[in-house]
Image (cartoon, rainbow, N blue to C red):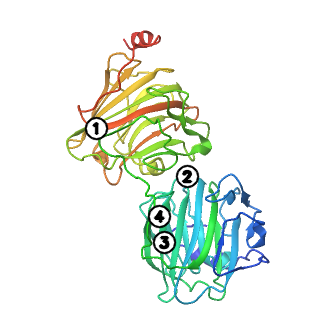
Amino acid sequence: MFHGRFLAISMMIVLLQAGIAHSQAPYTYPFTENFESGGLNDNWAPATSEGIAQLSTDQANSGSRSVFLERTQSAHSYTDPAILAAVDGIPQTGKIEVNASIYPVTLDGSNFIHVLALGGNTGNAYSCVTVAIATGSFQLEAFNFDQGFWNGGSGIVIETDQWYHIKVVVDQDADIYSVFLTVGNGSEVLVIQNGTLGAKFGSPDNNHIMSFPFVPGNSYYVDDVSVKAFTGDTPPTPTPTPMPVTLDFPACEDFETDPGPAGVFQLLGHTSGVAEWSTDQARSGTRSIHLRKDSGNSDVPRLQVNLSNAPQTGSIEVEFDTYFVTTATNFIQFGHFGNKQTQITDGYKIMTLGINPGAEFQANDGVAWLDPIGGPISPALDMWTHHRLVFDQINKLWSYWQTVDGQQELQLYDQELTADNAIAVGDEAFPWFSSIPFGSGADYYLDNFCIHVAGAGTPTPTPTPGPNAVEYWELLE
């Protein structure tokens, strides 16, 4: 069954499905549920024959408990796994807000993830409005029967291992809704404005709230659900602690302070490996970022940072250090400029430094993986390597130099960006730097990320050459 922007056939089939048996006590408007007491079955009807819908203490947006949802069976389902609750007494006039916090663990990307549905029970879950993480783009969109298409595209890409707060404001008098999104402790952002309700929320047979992952490969936590009167501004006042979203220019980061899953530097994708602040290795100071991929291709561990403050003219320089422990069965994309890991289905943007499955350095120009000047070179393991890139933002040229264990600097690339990827670093559409241990078995540390005007930086001091340096450089010769 096809599920996307044209859902008429699947909707007709779904409407014929039987709903979840709903003998739980309904909530009475207004209410707030943080799942800290009682059982899930007290007010919610969990469906669990094709996946997981259960209370959990593994994650919580507030307190110590939330609800974990995961679809484990093949194909898709609107009804299982799911959580569903009825709400009595919803006013049919005025403005109402519906809130829920979600924490994605795995995101399949092949179909919509229905994180907050307002309307009927199961088969008619779309009757008012459903907010979902969209196929491919991983942005919030919304749908209802009346409009018959997905509305939105917030510009904010939903990532794993991060709490997001969703607020749906329903204007019962005008029969419209707006959706707001808050990332972590950041500012509340209006992402969908004045969409049309399919049915009045709280009208007969339209007084339910529901959440369901829809397809296998999707799992997430839900916490802090509420339905209450909306009394805020339009848009509401931002939360007190704005989350920084871009790196200042010029800037250097030595990772002596834990960046965590939010903020300028983001550590994401912990479920299939490691993306963490570590004291095991450090190029300077005592800490660095540890990145390791254990298995699978979903929810890849990664470090990412938004470089959109970089000047779009002149030449800029990017430097960072790596300490490779092991190579991998697939490419290690240790220096990727352009789009995020969740956007790589669009192809590589700008350029990528990598280590191929044969344990050799290569760079991707958006078309192919290219060997260095002079032929293949293998990475040095168990020693620090300094990477330096210079980008000509006007002429769309880039060059790359490498220094291993304090030896002389070696130029490996001097390239022109390909026509489809002639994009300046920090471009508004593709502003990201990522370091991604994509291949299973990849294990390395990253330290001292710097971006500045070319030639204006102060490179990390090179230490006395280590015991393996001479051997490595003799191999290069």
In the rendered image, which residue does mark 3 sit on? 179
In the rendered image, which residue does mark 4 sit on? 239
Tell me which amino acid carries mark 4. Thr
Please tell me which residue lies in front, 334 or 262.
262
Tell me which amino acid carries mark 3. Val
Position of residue 458 measured from the top left corner of the image (x, y, whole percent):
29, 29
In primary-sequence order, the first of circles 2 and 4 is: 2
Contact? badges 2 and 4 (CB < 8 Å): no
Tell me which amino acid carries mark 1. His
Contact? badges 2 and 3 (CB < 8 Å): no
Distance Cα–Cα, label 4 vs label 1: 32 Å
Q: Secondary structure at mark 3?
A: strand
In the rendered image, which residue does mark 2 sit on? 160
Distance Cα–Cα, label 1 vs label 3: 38 Å
Contact? badges 4 and 1 (CB < 8 Å): no
In primary-sequence order, the first of circles 3 and 4 is: 3
Q: Nearer the viewer, mark 4 or mark 1?
A: 4
Q: Secondary structure at mark 4?
A: loop
Q: Secondary structure at mark 1?
A: strand
Distance Cα–Cα, label 3 vs label 4: 16 Å
Q: Residue at x 47, y 10 (%)?
A: 467
How packed mark 4 is, by other alpha carbons closer than 10 Å (few <14, some 14-19, many 20 or more), is: few
Position of residue 140 measured from the top left corner of the image (x, y, whole percent):
49, 65
How packed mark 2 is, by other alpha carbons closer than 10 Å (few <14, some 14-19, many 20 or more), is: many
How packed mark 3 is, by other alpha carbons closer than 10 Å (few <14, some 14-19, many 20 or more), is: many
User: Which quadrant would residue 73 be assigned to in this image?
Assistant: bottom right
In primary-sequence order, the first of circles 1 and 2 is: 2
Please tell me which residue lies in front, 432 or 285.
285
Q: Nearer the viewer, mark 1 or mark 3?
A: 1
